[in-house]
Structures are given as C-alpha cells and as structure tokens.
C-alpha cells in the first residue's frame, strides 16, 4: 500500500544504540500494526495500536521494545540497546477501522542492521 | 498449533508452467487465509485470499484451493511468467484477532524465461 509511509528505509546501528522507526499511516487511518521479518522468514506480529492506545502487544518482546501512536504524528517503534538479533525488516500496516477481515496492506518497511 | 507450514522453500518453473505452493495449518479456529507476494526490498502485497466456506477462489492466473478437512490450502499460478518471480507467503488468522496474521516461512519462486 503506497499510502503507508515508513522511514527510514534503511538504518544501521551499533550494538547498544537506540533505533527509532516511524510509520505514517494512510491519511485518516487510526489503526496501526507493526510486524517484524527476520531474514529468510515470514512476518511476525508485534503490536497493534490505535491512536494513543496500545490494543495488543502480545508479539512485542518484553524488554527494550516499545511502540506508540500519538494523537499527532507518526507511529514510532523504538528499540533500545539494540543487539545483532534485532537486525530485521520492520513493516507497518494501517487501517481506517479495526480490521475484521485480516486484510492488511503493508508499507515498504524499515530495514535495521545492527553491527 | 499457531504455526502455518509452507512448502516448498524454493521453486523453479519454466515460463508458461504451473507454480504450486502448499500450506498446512493446525488451528481450526483460523477463518481467513491470504497469500502475499513480496519482491526483494519491498513490503508484502496482498495477492488473493480465501475463507473456509469455499473450496476454491480464482483471480486471473492465481487460484487458491482450500481443503478444510485436511487443513491445507494451496496457491496455483497458471501460465507462470518471469515477472511472477518473487517470494510468496501464505498466512492465516482468526476472527477475534484477524489483524494477527500467522505467516508461513515463504517460498522463493523463480520463473525461467
């Protein structure tokens, strides 16, 4: 979905640094979903947010990872003290209403490389 | 029980041939089964999807076959073209958390000219 904008497209961090990934949903969409894709694997659900609320974070690692979707501005996925295992592509999708069909349309992703 | 198993891992098909990718699942609560196509460096794009109330769905050259009793579903690409070369992912989700797609591990398809 060309309407979901993610940046940066590529991010390189050294171990211990912080990574911030941004997702601007399609205009007017108030539901955002983050997925992670490890190399040579399928996507895995991380978190579902609605404006100012976390609805489901069952796929998010308990430590170092956090997500927000403020009233104004993009959704942010924050990874503190990155480790090599965090190297992955992070994809965002958005929807106007709560998804009840499973039809998610993803952005082009942010590729994080941890040195 | 949450897994979706996909095979083969890679597939090479001649132009004009039929590409077949298979997926199997365990959780009978799954009620939505999409297929995604992903080109290198891009996000996955929804290709076609099916619900368990039908056994087949066709859109152009792409067909999903669904076998509820066997808990299996497959993607058939007829008249495969070099432009179809991509990685294909099956997925599944269930009604109360349909946004939480469970993805297969992917099939890398190469269509030779």
Image (cartoon, rainbow, N blue to C red):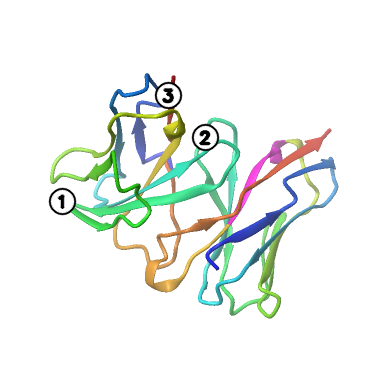
Q: Which mark is residue A61?
A: none
Q: Residue at x 47, y 50 (%)?
A: A44
Depth check, mark 3 against mark 2: the one in front is: 3
Q: Position of residue A84 (x, y in %)?
A: 44, 28
Is residue B71 rendered to the left or right of residue A74?
right
Q: Nearer the viewer, mark 1 or mark 2?
A: 1
Q: Residues within 10 Å of mark 1 (few under 14, many from 20)?
A: few
Q: CA distance from mark 1 to mark 3?
A: 29 Å
Residue underneath mark 2: B42
| Apparent side of residue A27 relative to residue B36 in the rendered image (left or right) | left
Q: Chain of mark 2?
A: B
Q: Residue at x 71, y 76 (%)?
A: B70
Q: Is residue A1 visible?
A: yes
**Chain of the residue that carries numbered disc 1 in the rendered image:** A
Name the subunit of mark 3: A
Q: SS for tag 3?
A: strand
Residue B48 in magenta? no
Q: Are marks 3 and 2 in contact (CB under 8 Å)?
A: no
Residue indicated by mark 1: A52
Residue B87 forms part of the magenta stretch: yes
Looking at the rendered structure, the secondary structure element under dot 2 is: loop
Question: In the drawing, what numbered circle is on residue A114?
Answer: 3
Q: Nearer the viewer, residue A81 or B60?
A: A81
Residue drawn at x 13%, y 46% as measured from the top left: A71
Quarter-of-image position of residue B69: bottom right
Placement of the C terminus of chain A among the 4 image quadrants: top left
**Which SS type dominates the magenta stretch?**
strand
């Amino acid at each position: 979905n060309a309407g979901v904008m993610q940046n940066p497209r590529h991010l390189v961090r050294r171990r211990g640094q912080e990574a911030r990934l941004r997702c601007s949903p399609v205009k007017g969409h108030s539901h955002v979903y983050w997925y992670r894709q490890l190399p040579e694997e399928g996507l895995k659900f991380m978190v579902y947010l609605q404006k100012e609320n976390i609805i489901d974070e069952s796929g998010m690692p308990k430590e170092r990872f956090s997500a927000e979707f403020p009233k104004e501005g993009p959704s942010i996925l924050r990874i503190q003290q990155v480790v090599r295992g965090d190297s992955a592509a992070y994809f965002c999708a958005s929807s106007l209403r709560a998804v009840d069909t499973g039809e998610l349309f993803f952005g082009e992703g942010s590729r994080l490389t941890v040195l | 029980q949450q897994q979706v198993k996909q095979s083969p891992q890679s597939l090479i098909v001649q132009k004009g041939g039929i590409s077949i990718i298979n997926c199997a699942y365990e959780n009978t609560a799954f009620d939505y089964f999409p297929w995604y196509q992903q080109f290198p460096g891009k996000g996955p794009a929804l290709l076609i999807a099916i619900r368990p109330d039908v056994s087949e769905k066709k859109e152009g050259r792409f067909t999903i076959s669904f076998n509820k009793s066997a808990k299996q579903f497959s993607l058939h690409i007829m008249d495969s073209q070099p432009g179809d070369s991509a990685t294909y992912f099956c997925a599944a989700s269930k009604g109360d958390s349909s946004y939480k797609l469970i993805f297969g591990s992917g099939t890398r398809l190469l269509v030779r000219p």
